[in-house]
Amino acid sequence: MKKAVLKQFRDIYHHFREHGLRATLFWFHGKDAPGIIQFLKYGLAGGIATVASMGTWLVLCLTIYPAISAEEMQKYRDLVGFVGLELPTFEVESMELDRDLRAANSLWANIWGWVAGNNVAYLVNVLWVFQGGRHNRWLEYFYFTLISAIATLAGLAMGPLLIKIFGIPTGLSQVSLLITAVLVNYVCRKFFIFAK
């Protein structure tokens, strides 16, 4: 593996020497970019999808599905206050939320966040990261969504469980979901769904 990665870096260097910076950056933007660049682009695409998913989750946890306790909100306030920002006060902060309610509401907010994140991930991956063609678009989207659902279900099972059993903060439970989803999704998308 180490040799393969080093070879890719050598190929990038030779491409740069032969074609220049502009052509190399254009090459990186294409779907035939070296695997290491494709993985970095996948990471960036995943970051965009994560913002869509987590953003949806957070908005819903603060509004429709209250899941963030006043104590946890204060920790977030302290964190953003450290960089000079200020968070508004949310109605959820005045609610008494036990572990079971937080876990259930976080689950529902995650389901809707997953829908948003999955659609953003599919669009960014198709347009920028992977080359389709192994399956027709509808079947490709179905497989993409199925793999995403399996990975997310594994992560979703862990989040509420960690909240109920260990009483960890709702935000921290999201980390287990993200780690599980990233690992399963990349391998399955790269080798089973997309052609390249």
Image (tube, grey):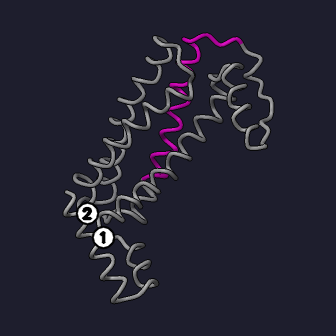
**Mark 1, residues whose alpha carbon is within 10 Å: few (<14), some, or many (≥20)?**
some
Range shown magenta: 96-121
Decide which of 55, 9 is in the foreground and name it.
9
In the rendered view, does 168 fall on the left or right side of 28? right
Residue 40 on image: x %, y %: 40, 59
Identify the residue at horizontal 77%, vertical 42% (top origin). Answer: 85
**Mark 2, residues whose alpha carbon is within 10 Å: few (<14), some, or many (≥20)?**
few
In the rendered view, does 114 fall on the left or right side of 36? right
User: Where residue 5 is drawn, which disc sits there?
Assistant: 2
User: Where residue 92 is drawn, which disc sits there?
Assistant: none
Q: Quadrant of the N terminus?
A: bottom left
Residue 130 on image: x %, y %: 34, 62
Up/down of 180 relative to 94, above or below = below
Secondary element at tag 1: helix
Magenta-colored segment: predominant secondary structure: helix
Residue 29 on image: x %, y %: 42, 73
Q: Quadrant of the C terminus?
A: bottom left
Identify the residue at horizontal 25%, vertical 63% (top origin). Answer: 5
Up/down of 145 relative to 36, above or below = above
Is residue 102 a member of the stretch shown in magenta?
Answer: yes
Up/down of 122 relative to 97, above or below = below
Decide which of 33, 128 is in the foreground and name it.
33
Identify the residue at horizontal 50%, vertical 17% (top origin). Answer: 163
User: Where residue 9 is drawn, which disc sits there?
Assistant: 1
Decide which of 107, 14 is in the foreground and name it.
14
In the rendered view, does 73 fall on the left or right side of 19? right
Q: Amino acid at mark 2?
A: Val
